């Protein structure tokens, strides 16, 4: 079993976090922007406008990226290095960090189901890409 290289894990996690935040900007900020605006107006809430809100979502993006690469680092010895293992790790993070929260909002009719589905699928694509790229930069220490 390899030992985890925490510096390489941090590098991979940082890169993955950048990919997640870029993906969130593209999916939510560009492709689904109008849908999000309509959903927020229906709740009588403004779109994100404060620095604190934007910063919180940026931190969340970096945490998701770091989580994906961390899961990859821990399952790499069991499943082998590579894209398949990175996708497995990214999928695990997607279920916990994306899907579980979206289901609640959709079931309780907080957001339209179509918006929940579209943003969650976008989240799956972004976390898979982020984890795969972050995993590319991760290498464990030798035994």
Image (spheres, rainbow, N blue to C red):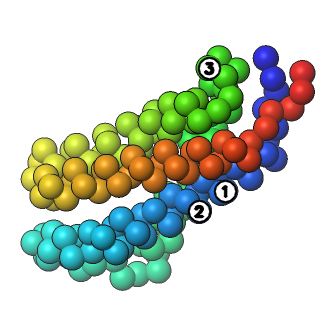
Residue 47, percent across and down? 28, 78
**Relative to residue 138, is residue 50 drawn left or right?**
left
Instruction: Tell me how far mark 1 sits from mark 3, CA to CA.
Output: 23 Å
Q: Nearer the viewer, mark 3 or mark 2?
A: 3
Left or right of residue 37: residue 133: right
Q: Which quadrant of the figure contains the N terminus?
A: top right
Say which residue label 2 marks: 18
Does 69 appear above or below 60?
A: above
Q: Which residue is painted at 62% across and 49% down in the image?
A: 133
Q: Residues within 10 Å of mark 3 (few under 14, many from 20)?
A: few
Q: Nearer the viewer, mark 1 or mark 3?
A: 3
Would you place residue 108 above or below residue 111 in this image? above
Residue at 74% from the left image edge and 47% from the top image edge: 137
Q: Which residue is mark 3?
A: 79
Quarter assignment of residue 54? bottom left
Is disc 1 in contact with disc 2, using a CB cutoff of under 8 Å? yes
């Amino acid at each position: 079993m390899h030992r985890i290289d925490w510096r390489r894990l941090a590098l991979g996690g940082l890169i993955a976090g950048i990919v997640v935040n870029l993906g969130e900007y593209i999916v939510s900020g560009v492709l689904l922007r109008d849908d999000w605006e309509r959903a927020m107006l229906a709740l009588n809430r403004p779109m994100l406008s404060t620095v604190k809100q934007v910063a919180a979502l940026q931190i969340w993006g970096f945490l998701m990226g770091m989580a994906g690469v961390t899961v990859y680092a821990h399952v790499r010895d069991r499943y082998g290095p590579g894209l398949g293992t990175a996708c497995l790790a990214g999928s695990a993070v997607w279920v916990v960090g994306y899907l579980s929260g979206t289901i609640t909002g959709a079931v309780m009719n907080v957001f339209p189901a179509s918006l929940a589905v579209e943003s969650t699928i976008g989240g799956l694509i972004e976390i898979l890409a982020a984890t795969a790229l972050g995993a590319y930069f991760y290498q464990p220490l030798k035994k």
